[in-house]
Amino acid sequence: MRSLVVDDELTSQRLLAICLQDYGDCGVANDGHQALDAVRGALEQNQPFDLICLDIMMPGLDGQETLAEIRRLEQEAGLEPEHRAKVLMVTAVFDEDNVMKQIDEWDAYLVKPIERQAIIDVLQRLALI
């Protein structure tokens, strides 16, 4: 499994990355712009990410804006919907309006602080492990 963790909070970023490294390659990005560069590069190498963990609230491009751009890049690359990255939205505070804004574009969400078992449960539910 190829995964990417996008979070401006270093502690959350490291926790997610450490958990995901047990299941394959895991990259990290500190913001939406770095995430888009990583996704673009992965698509150009024909090695798209299987999972993207995306913080909703980030400075600059927030998670919703970043996700919309990721989906556009995947579509431009010709990925069929069943082959696009699974997206795990991560939030510090469950704000239903914010979380539900693009519910059709993501596959799961977790509220911080994130526990290892919760990540494993999501990976299993998404058939990634």
Image (cartoon, rainbow, N blue to C red):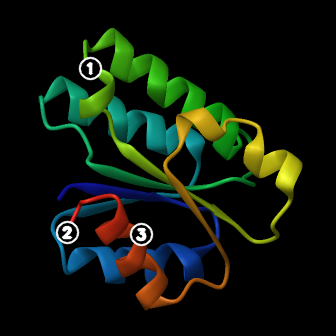
- Please report whichever mark, 1 or 2, sits nearer to the chain's N-terminal start: 1
Callout 3, which amino acid?
Answer: Val
**Badge number at residue 80:** 1
Give the mark nearest the N terminus, 3 or 2: 3
Residue tagged 3:
122
> Looking at the picture, does residue 26 appear above or below residue 111?
above
Q: Position of residue 42 (x, y in %)?
A: 23, 36
Label 3: how many Cα within 10 Å (few below 14, some 14–19, many 20+): some
Distance between mark 1 and mark 2 Cα atoms:
21 Å
Q: Which residue is mark 2?
A: 129
Answer yes or no: do the residues labelled 1 and 2 have beta carbons within 8 Å? no
Residue found 64% across the figure and 40% down from its top: 103
> Is 105 drawn above or below residue 27 in the view shown?
above
Taking the spot 48% from the left edge, 43% from the top edge, the residue there is: 34
User: Element type at marker 3?
Assistant: helix
First of labels 1, 3 by sequence position: 1
- Tell me which residue sits at (27%, 31%) in the image: 82
Q: Amino acid at mark 1?
A: Glu
Q: Secondary structure at mark 1?
A: loop
